[in-house]
Image (spheres, helix red, strand yellow):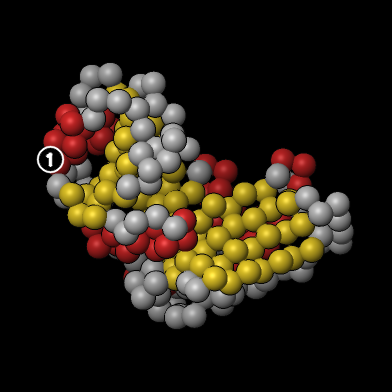
């Protein structure tokens, strides 16, 4: 049976996804805060983010405290449900899709001629890189597995290497390193990424919206 059939979006799922994402990126574990989960990213373009499964009243409380760029509020719902909870001067954008994987053993395609596949494991984190004949990085991605979630993260393909199936190879190779069959497979995808994942059996379980002060930069 497809794993995504059993995946339901709720606060616990958001927590589990964020916890595994933090492992993947070497970030602190998420902390429960006013109905959502806060991650202290401490990066130049993003200091903190709050992620909510539902349009909680706590969103208003968090937003009122934010007075400068770099503090993002994310909601696993359409932008129409996030916008009314934010003060004037905020931008709201549809920034992605929360998706659940098929939960089936992937069929991993072969590496195209002229490219080399490299896999590195560091504890619960796996990195996949595809190198061009020149040695340049053509495509890459990460996954992290905890007891509660298997998260695919930071899938990227260089513009000059697209439409060759490299993204599919990265994703399927990462999935082949999953250890626990019953663990939900989760990710957040952009519009372009969503189309790829759907061809691989992933299903959308929610929209993913972002609120930020208008001169903020999200990445």
Who's the residue at 32% across and 42% down the image? 48
Who's the residue at 44% across and 58% down the image? 26
Residue 124 horizontal/vertical position (percent):
48, 72
- Residue 213 appears in the rendering: yes
Who's the residue at 32% across and 43% down the image? 49
Who's the residue at 36% across and 75% down the image? 147
* Front-most of residues 3 and 186: 186
Instruction: Tell me where residue 57 sits by quadrant.
Output: top left
Instruction: Tell me where residue 182 sits by quadrant.
Output: bottom left
Residue 159 placement, left or right of 50: right
- On the image, numbered disc 1 is attached to which residue? 57
Image quarter of the N terminus? bottom left
- Residue 100 appears in the rendering: no
Identify whether 81 is placed above or below 25.
above
Residue 112 horizontal/vertical position (percent):
81, 61
Identify whether 58 is placed above or below 92.
below
Residue 213 placement, left or right of 3: left
Q: Residues within 10 Å of mark 1 (few under 14, many from 20)?
A: few
Residue 140 horizontal/vertical position (percent):
64, 55
Residue 35 placement, left or right of 148: left
Q: How many marks?
A: 1
* Front-most of residues 14 and 206: 14
Q: Secondary structure at mark 1?
A: loop
Residue 212 horizontal/vertical position (percent):
33, 30
């Amino acid at each position: 049976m497809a794993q995504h059939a059993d995946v339901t979006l709720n606060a616990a799922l958001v927590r589990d996804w964020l916890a595994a994402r933090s492992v993947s990126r070497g970030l602190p574990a998420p902390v429960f805060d006013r109905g959502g989960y806060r991650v202290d990213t401490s990066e130049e373009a993003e200091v903190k983010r709050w992620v909510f499964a539902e349009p909680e009243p706590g969103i208003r409380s968090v937003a009122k405290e934010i007075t400068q760029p770099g503090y993002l509020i994310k909601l696993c719902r359409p932008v129409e449900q996030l916008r009314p909870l934010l003060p004037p001067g905020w931008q709201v954008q549809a920034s992605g899709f929360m998706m659940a994987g098929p939960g089936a053993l992937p069929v991993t395609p072969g590496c195209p001629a002229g490219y080399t596949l490299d896999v590195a494991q560091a504890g619960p984190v796996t990195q996949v890189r595809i190198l061009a004949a020149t040695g340049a990085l053509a495509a890459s991605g990460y996954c992290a597995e905890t007891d509660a979630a298997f998260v695919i993260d930071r899938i990227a393909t260089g513009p000059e290497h697209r439409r060759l199936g490299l993204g599919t190879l990265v994703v399927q190779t990462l999935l082949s390193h999953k250890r626990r069959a019953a663990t939900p497979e989760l990710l957040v995808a952009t519009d372009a990424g969503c189309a790829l994942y759907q061809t691989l059996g992933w299903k959308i379980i929610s929209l993913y919206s972002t609120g930020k002060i208008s001169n903020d930069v999200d990445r």
